[in-house]
C-alpha cells in the first residue's frame, strides 16, 4: 500500500484473462476496507505501462483530494476513502504513421512505414499463441510487397485479422464485421484516403451542430479551429499507410476484448468481495478510455445473479460505441451495456464525459466508418453509426441527459437511473487524456457526495 494525496492506494494487477497476479492484493484491499466508508476502483486505458497508469492515478487522486475543501463537499472530506488502481496488460495505439501528412512517397518514407507497421505487429506478438506469432511473422514478411501486389495485400490483411479474438456481442456496434467482410486490397484502398471527422461538438442527445472539417495535429492533439477530431492526411496516401491503420485497428480490437474480460471477470470479483458481509462499503467505478469500457463491463457483469450494485459509475472519455447504453441504435440493435440501465445496477450517479476535442476516440471510430462507407464527408459525429461515446456522449438513449461540465464550486444535481453526459468541448477537456483537471474531478467528487 502507498498513500497518494492523503488517500491510501492499493494496486490490483490483472492478466488478460482477468486473474490477479497476486491474490494477496485483493486481500490487502478488503482488509483495509473494513475501516473505510468508500473504495474507488479506477482503471487506465490503452497505451499505458505501469508507470503511465500510476501517473494517471496520482494526478486524478491529487486533483480529487484538492476538491474536498469545498463547502459543498465537506461530507465527502469526512469519509475514509480508499483507492484501488487496476493494472491490465494494454498495448500502444498509434495515432499517427509515417506518411499520414500526405508527404511524397519516397524510399525513406516507405522504409519508415514498413518499420512502423513491423513494430505494431511485433507488439501484437508479445502475448500471442505460437500460431498467431507465425501468422504475424508471415504478415511482416509481406510488407515490402504490399504497395503493388493485390494478392499480397489480401493475404496480409487476412493474416493480421486472424489473430483477433472471437467476436462478442459488442462488436456488432463497433465495426469488426466491416473489416472481416471485405478483401484486404479493398480495405487498404479505402484507408489510403484521408479519414475525416467533424470539427464541431455533438449536439445534446443526437445530431451535430454543423460546421466544417479542419486539419488536426495528432501529436499535439490540436486542431486548426479549436474543435475535435479532423482530417488525417491531406492527400491520397500509400497502401503501406493503410497497412499501418489495419495493424493499429487489430491492436484496438484486441485491447477492446481484453479490457472487457478484465472488467467483467476480475474487477467484478473485487466489487463482490468489497460488497460482501461484513464490508459493504460504497464502491465507485472510474475508468478512462478503454478503462471506461472495462468499468462499464464490470457494471454489466454485476447485473448477473446475484446482482451487486456499485454506488457510482464514472466514465472518462470512454472508448466504446455511443450506442452502448441504447435500447435501439435506430436499426434494431441493442447496446452491449444496456442491461446496466435497465437493471438499475448502479444505485448512484452514472457520469460520462465527452468532448469534441477527444482526438483519439473520434479517430478510432472515424476509421471504422471510413471502412464501412467509402465517402469523403465528415464522419465520427453523433449521427455516425460508428461514433464513440467519449466523442459524442450516449446517443439514442432515453435515459441520457446532457449538460456542460460545471465550474468547480458550482454544484450539480445528479439524478439516478440516467446517464449524465458532461460536455467538455470548448476547452474543458482539451484532449483524450485531459481527465484529471479540476472540472472533471469536481464532477466525480460531486457524484461521490450524493451516495
Image: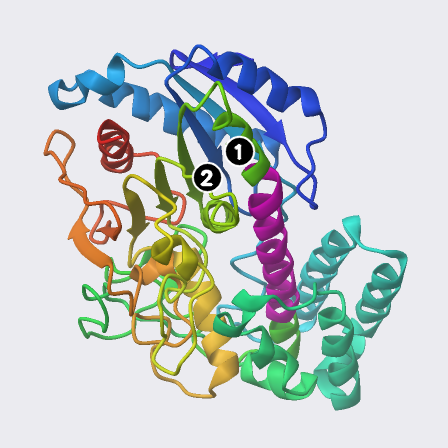
What kind of secondary structure does the magenta stretch mostly adopt?
helix
Bin the neighbour count of mark 2 within 10 Å (Cα to Cα): few under 14, some 14-19, many 20 and up.
some
Residue 394 visible at all: yes
Horizontal side of 347 relative to 20 (left or right) equals left
Mark nearer the N terminus (1 vs 2) = 1
Residue 194 visible at all: no
- The residue at which mark 2 appears reads as 308
Q: Tell me if residue 66 comes above or below residue 352 in the rendering.
A: above
Magenta stretch bounds: 244-267
Residue 141 in the image, given as x and y percentages of width and height? 85, 70
Type of colouring:
rainbow
Q: Residue at x 69, y 37 (%)?
A: 19
Q: Residue at x 61, y 72 (%)?
A: 241
Q: Are marks 1 and 2 in contact (CB under 8 Å)?
A: yes
Horizontal side of 158 relative to 102 (left or right) equals right
Horizontal side of 29 relative to 37 (left or right) equals right
Q: Tell me if residue 5 comes above or below residue 381 in the rendering.
A: above
SS type, badge 2:
loop
Residue 276 in the image, given as x and y percentages of width and height? 51, 26
The mark found on residue 313 in the picture is none
- The residue at which mark 1 appears reads as 272
Amino acid at each position: 500500500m502507498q498513500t497518494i494525496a492523503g488517500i491510501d492506494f492499493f494496486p490490483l494487477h490483472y492478466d488478460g484473462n482477468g486473474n490477479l497476479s497476486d491474490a494477496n492484493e485483493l486481500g490487502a484491499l478488503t482488509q483495509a476496507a473494513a475501516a473505510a466508508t468508500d473504495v474507488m476502483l479506477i482503471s487506465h486505458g490503452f497505451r499505458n505501462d505501469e508507470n503511465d497508469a500510476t501517473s494517471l492515478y496520482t494526478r486524478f487522486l491529487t486533483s480529487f483530494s484538492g476538491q474536498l475543501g469545498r463547502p459543498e463537499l465537506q461530507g465527502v472530506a469526512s469519509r475514509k476513502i480508499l483507492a484501488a488502481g487496476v493494472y491490465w496488460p494494454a498495448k500502444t495505439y498509434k495515432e499517427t504513421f509515417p506518411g499520414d501528412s500526405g508527404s511524397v512517397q519516397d524510399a525513406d518514407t516507405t522504409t519508415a512505414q514498413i518499420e512502423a507497421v513491423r513494430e505494431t505487429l511485433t507488439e501484437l506478438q508479445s502475448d500471442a499463441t505460437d500460431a498467431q506469432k507465425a501468422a504475424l511473422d508471415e504478415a511482416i514478411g509481406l510488407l515490402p510487397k504490399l504497395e503493388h501486389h493485390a494478392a499480397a495485400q489480401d493475404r496480409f490483411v487476412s493474416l493480421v485479422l486472424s489473430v483477433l479474438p472471437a467476436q462478442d456481442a459488442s462488436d456488432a456496434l463497433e465495426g469488426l464485421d466491416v473489416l472481416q467482410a471485405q478483401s484486404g486490397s479493398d480495405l487498404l484502398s479505402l484507408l489510403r484516403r484521408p479519414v475525416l471527422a467533424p470539427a464541431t461538438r455533438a449536439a445534446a442527445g443526437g445530431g451535430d451542430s454543423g460546421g466544417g472539417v479542419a486539419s488536426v495535429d495528432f501529436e499535439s492533439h490540436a486542431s486548426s479551429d479549436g474543435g475535435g477530431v479532423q482530417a488525417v492526411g491531406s492527400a491520397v496516401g500509400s497502401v503501406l499507410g493503410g497497412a499501418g491503420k489495419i495493424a493499429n485497428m487489430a491492436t484496438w480490437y484486441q485491447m477492446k476484448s481484453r479490457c472487457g474480460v478484465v472488467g467483467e471477470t476480475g474487477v467484478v470479483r473485487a466489487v463482490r468481495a468489497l460488497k460482501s458481509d461484513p464490508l459493504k462499503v460504497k464502491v465507485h467505478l472510474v475508468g478512462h478510455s478503454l478503462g471506461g469500457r472495462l468499468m462499464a463491463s464490470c457494471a454489466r457483469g454485476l447485473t448477473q445473479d446475484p446482482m451487486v450494485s456499485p454506488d457510482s459509475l464514472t466514465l472518462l472519455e470512454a472508448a466504446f460505441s455511443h450506442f452502448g447504453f441504447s435500447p435501439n441504435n435506430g436499426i434494431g440493435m441493442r447496446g452491449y451495456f444496456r442491461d446496466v440501465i435497465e437493471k438499475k445496477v448502479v444505485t448512484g450517479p452514472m457520469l460520462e464525459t465527452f468532448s469534441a476535442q477527444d482526438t483519439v476516440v473520434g479517430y478510432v471510430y472515424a476509421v471504422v466508418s471510413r471502412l464501412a462507407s467509402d465517402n469523403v464527408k465528415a464522419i465520427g459525429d453523433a449521427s455516425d453509426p460508428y461514433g464513440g461515446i467519449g466523442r459524442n456522449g450516449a446517443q439514442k438513449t432515453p435515459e441520457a441527459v446532457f449538460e456542460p461540465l460545471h465550474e468547480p464550486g458550482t454544484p450539480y444535481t445528479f439524478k439516478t437511473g440516467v446517464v449524465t453526459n458532461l460536455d467538455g468541448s470548448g476547452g474543458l477537456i482539451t484532449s483524450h487524456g485531459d481527465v484529471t483537471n479540476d472540472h472533471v474531478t469536481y464532477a466525480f467528487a460531486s457524484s461521490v457526495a450524493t451516495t
